[in-house]
Structure formats: C-alpha cells, structure tokens
Amino acid sequence: MEVKSFTYNKSFSYSVTIGLSLLIMLFILRSYQLEDPSEIRILKYIGLLFFIILGLVILRFLIPFINQYPALELNDLSLVDKVRNREVNWENVKGIRLINFPNGGAGVCIDLLNKDLFRSNLNTGQKFLGWISNLTYGTPFVIPLQYISGINQEIFETLQFFLNKTITVPNNM
C-alpha cells in the first residue's frame, strides 16, 4: 500500500507561536503600566485567554511539527486530514478543486459523492465547520493548505494522483 504524508507547516507553526507569545508579553508589560485595578484585571484575563490559545497552538501545531507528525496522509484507501481529524474513503470522492480563500490562502475542496456518510463521522464542531464550508464552497470537506508543509500546487497534484489511481484501479484487485 502506497502512503504519502505531508507534515505540519514550519512557518505557520513558528509564526503563530511567536506572534501569540509577543502578544502575551505586550499584555504583561502593559499591565505594569496601568494603575487602575479593574484595567489590570481585564488585561490579565485577556492575557490568560491568549496564553490558553498559545498552549492550544503549541499542542496542535508546534509539537506535531517538531515531531514530524503527518498533517495530511494519503493512502490507497483514504485521505486523512490529521489537522482537523477528518477522513474520507477515495470511493466517496467525486473530485477535488484547488481554491483561493479571500484572505489570500489556499485550500483544497474535496467534492463528495455522499456528504451524509462523511458527516456521520464528525463531531459537532466539525459538522458546523462542514456546514459553513458546504454553504461557501459546495462541499463540507475543505482542507486549508496553510497548515500543511509543501507547495500548494504539488499537494493538489498529489491528491489528484491518488484520486485518479483509485478511479482507474478496480476495487476487486
């Protein structure tokens, strides 16, 4: 069984971690400049919120990048998006499209034959994101490429290769 993996994006992992760390330091420094206890308390709560977000970013992106865990995994049977913990069998994939997001990023739309089958394996948050993606892009399965290491066009072409391979090879072989 052929398997192709793409790791987490180094630039995204480091830039978000550094950016949030700088933001937290800014809140800490600003809290020392204030004298009003209620303003200090508000800044501390906002800083705590960003500290929690930083912890989540470290757990979800930085540690998997450092350990070289796959963010996207393709095999003969399925496509696995490990960033958002979603999987679809190639038999349920009708096609794929490379798209550009309004913010300048790119993504891959996975057009499905049976959207309900795909949704049945999702949690509530994933179903909500899928609902928004379905309204916006016509499919509940959109993979943002900012989290994945590699050139967007090459990732798309690799996905296309695996999809075409499963279409041309009969299932009973």
Image (cartoon, helix red, strand yellow):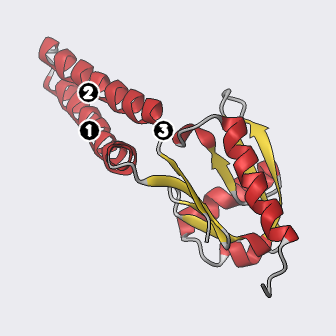
Closest to the observer: 15 or 68?
68
Closest to the observer: 119 or 108?
108
Give the mark toward the camera: 1 or 3: 3
Q: Residue at x 85, y 69 (%)?
A: 167
Q: Secondary structure at mark 3?
A: loop
Does residue 80 sit above or below 132 in this rendering?
A: below
On the image, the x and y values in percent for residue 126 come to 58, 63
Q: Are marks 2 and 1 in contact (CB under 8 Å)?
A: yes
* Residue with the most extreme bottom position: 172
Which residue matches tag 2? Answer: 24
Image label count: 3
Give the mark toward the camera: 3 or 2: 3
Mark 3–mark 2 distance (CA, rounded to whole Å): 23 Å
Of pointers 3 and 2, the one earlier in the residue sequence: 3
For residue 108, say whether it is visible. no
Crowding near the residue tagged with mark 3, few <14, some 14–19, many ≥20 C-alpha atoms within 10 Å:
many
